[in-house]
Image (cartoon, rainbow, N blue to C red):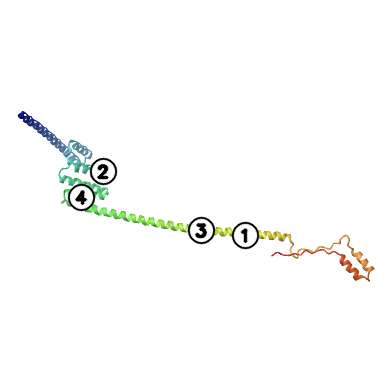
Amino acid sequence: MKQHIVVLLFVFIGCFSFAQDDEVKEMAKALNASTNITWDANKALSEDKFVEAEVDYRKAISKSDENVAAPFNLGNAYYNKETYSEAFGRFKEAGEIATDKKSKHKAFHNMGNVFMKRKEYEKAVEGYKQALRNDPTDEETRYNLALAKELLKKEQDDKKDDKNDEDKDDKKDKEDENKDKKEGDKEDNKDEDNKEDGDKGDEEKEDNKEGEGDEKKEQDKKPEEGDQKEQPKQPRPNQLSKQQVQNLLEAMQNEEKKVQEKIDAQKVKGVKVKNEKDW
């Protein structure tokens, strides 16, 4: 019984091994076909047949996910056409499927180059750092890293200066606004004072006008001194006429003084109006 179990186990292991060998053979076959297509794409690209090369690279990538050269070379083709988004995607793909450090170094180096073209210097610094981790001896990568750091520093300094300038402008604008507000308040206060003075002056003028009007009315009631003419003396009904007086004088020459006093007592003179000015 134990012998049969051992035999069956060997048969199962043998079948599994054969299956693995078949899978490896198929993957190797696919990679070989993908590589051949990649060579065709490289040839088309060298002859400036970009569309044909792009089609072949895509075929090569679909044939095998182990062919690092196909996405990497297609990324270079896009990079030279300045189609940086597509180029970055292909470089990233090559870096993810690469199993050796040399291939990873090239992929990260080129990703750094894409970020430099986009002026995304902070990301470029990280890309070059990843490339150097896989190949610390590459001087070109080291140079690009130093350049990216310098450009990043300049960008940050410029932003800082711009922010300081904006802060200064905002501060100045605020100061000008406060100054204008203060001046506006002063003008408003001045206008208010002038208005109050004007209202007060108008009130005084109105009062003076009313006083003058009252005075004028009072004066109109009283004739000016010198304008009043003395009214002629009119004899009252019972008063003697001049002729009668003359007759009496002639008749009473001896009693002239007595008669005259009597006449004076009986005469009624016109009353003269006294004009008193109001001060």
Q: Position of residue 3 (x, y in %)?
A: 4, 29
Return the residue nearer the eye: 87 or 1: 1
Residue at 42%, 57% (x, y): give it. 176
Residue at 66%, 60% (x, y): give it. 211
Mark 2, residue position: 85
Reading the chain from its start, which is encountered first: label 4 or label 1? 4
Front: mark 3 or 4: 3
Mark 4, residue position: 129
Q: Position of residue 4 (x, y in %)?
A: 6, 28
Q: Is residue 22 left or right of residue 228?
A: left
Circle 1 packing at 10 Å, graded few (<14), some (14-19), many (20+), is: few
Reading the chain from its start, which is encountered first: label 4 or label 2? 2
Pointers 3 and 2 in contact (C-beta within 8 Å): no
Pointers 3 and 4 in contact (C-beta within 8 Å): no
Q: Amino acid at mark 1?
A: Lys
Quarter occupied by the N terminus: top left
Mark 3, residue position: 189
Q: Farthest residue to the left: give it.
A: 3
Front: mark 4 or 2: 4
Q: Amino acid at mark 2?
A: Ser
Element type where label 2 sits in the image = helix
Element type where label 3 sits in the image = helix
In whole angstroms, how far apart are the C-alphas of marks 3 and 2? 64 Å
In whole angstroms, how far apart are the C-alphas of marks 4 and 2? 21 Å
